[in-house]
Image (cartoon, helix red, strand yellow):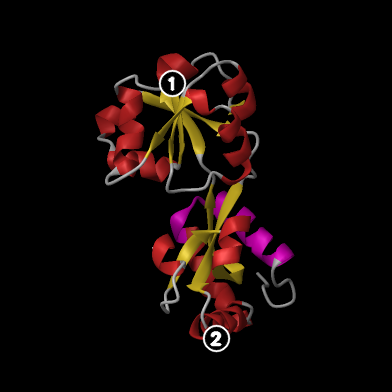
């Protein structure tokens, strides 16, 4: 999808992470299509047992822990520090890269991975998932945002303009609220809706 968005073909998608490089290639919506809980650090329980509930990736790298990462994704705030420790990074590329990521932990090829909880659960059996533990990442904000994105064409620009108008309208508040309350615990969904209301359209997004 990212490759298609980079072409002059009229292509749009949603839940695309926004980065400086991608903003040069695609046209993004002003508001997120959705927000979701951040990636976490995963490792075998034995590896993580003495670590606090929140960890710093920079400190873990400085302490010689090894990581597997996906070359097809951006780790946003972590990209620059991961690039500084390439000798401790195992890059995963090619077909099935998401499924291979978590399984590297089970085979003890690396110490840790950085991934979404739902992704790890998806690619592992319940028994395999039970062998792992995870921690929050200090360098990340609590939530990540996925945006609508279109290729940099005339049609793409027109579609994003229409999406922006729709997303900023009062009638979209309820569908956005319903989606996030269906996806997360009520207290998490409430924090997400506060961000929408505070940062994107406070005049029309009312409870």
The x and y percentages for residue 152 are 53, 75
> From the viewer's perspective, is residue 123 above or below residue 50?
below
The x and y percentages for residue 58 are 63, 27
- Residue 185: within the magenta? yes
- Packing grade of label 1 (10 A; few <14, some 14-19, many >=20) is many
Q: Nearer the viewer, residue 172 or 143?
A: 143
Q: Are marks 1 and 2 in contact (CB under 8 Å)?
A: no
N-term mark: 1 or 2: 1
Image point (65%, 69%), residue name: 207
> From the viewer's perspective, is residue 11 above or below residue 147?
below
Image point (62%, 38%), residue name: 80
Q: Nearer the viewer, residue 103 or 72?
A: 72
Camera sees residue 88: yes
Residue position marked by numbered label 1 in the rendering: 111
Taking 90 as reference, is 135 left or right? right
Residue position marked by numbered label 2 in the rendering: 158
- Which quarter shows the N terminus? bottom left
Total labels drawn: 2
Taking 7 as reference, is 187 left or right? right
Q: CA distance from mark 1 to mark 2?
A: 46 Å
Q: Start and end of the magenta stretch?
A: 182-199
Camera sees residue 56: no
């Amino acid at each position: 999808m990212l490759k298609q968005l980079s072409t002059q073909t009229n292509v749009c998608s949603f839940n695309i992470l926004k980065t400086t490089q991608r903003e040069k290639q695609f046209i993004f919506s002003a508001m997120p299509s959705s927000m979701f809980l951040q990636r976490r650090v995963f490792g075998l329980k034995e590896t993580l047992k003495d670590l606090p509930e929140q960890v710093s990736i920079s400190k873990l790298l400085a302490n010689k822990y090894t990581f597997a990462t996906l070359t097809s994704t951006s780790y946003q705030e972590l990209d620059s520090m991961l690039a500084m420790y390439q000798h401790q990074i195992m890059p995963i590329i090619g077909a099935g890269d998401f499924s291979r990521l978590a399984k590297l932990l089970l085979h003890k090829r690396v110490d840790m991975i950085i991934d979404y909880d739902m992704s790890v659960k998806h690619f592992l059996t319940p028994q395999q998932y039970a062998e792992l533990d995870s921690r929050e990442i200090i360098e990340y904000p609590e939530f990540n945002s996925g945006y609508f994105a279109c290729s940099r064409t005339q049609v793409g620009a027109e579609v994003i303009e229409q999406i922006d108008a729709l997303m900023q309208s009062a009638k979209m508040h309820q569908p956005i609220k319903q989606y996030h309350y269906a996806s997360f615990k009520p207290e998490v969904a409430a924090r997400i809706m506060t961000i929408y209301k505070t940062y994107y359209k406070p005049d029309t997004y009312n409870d």
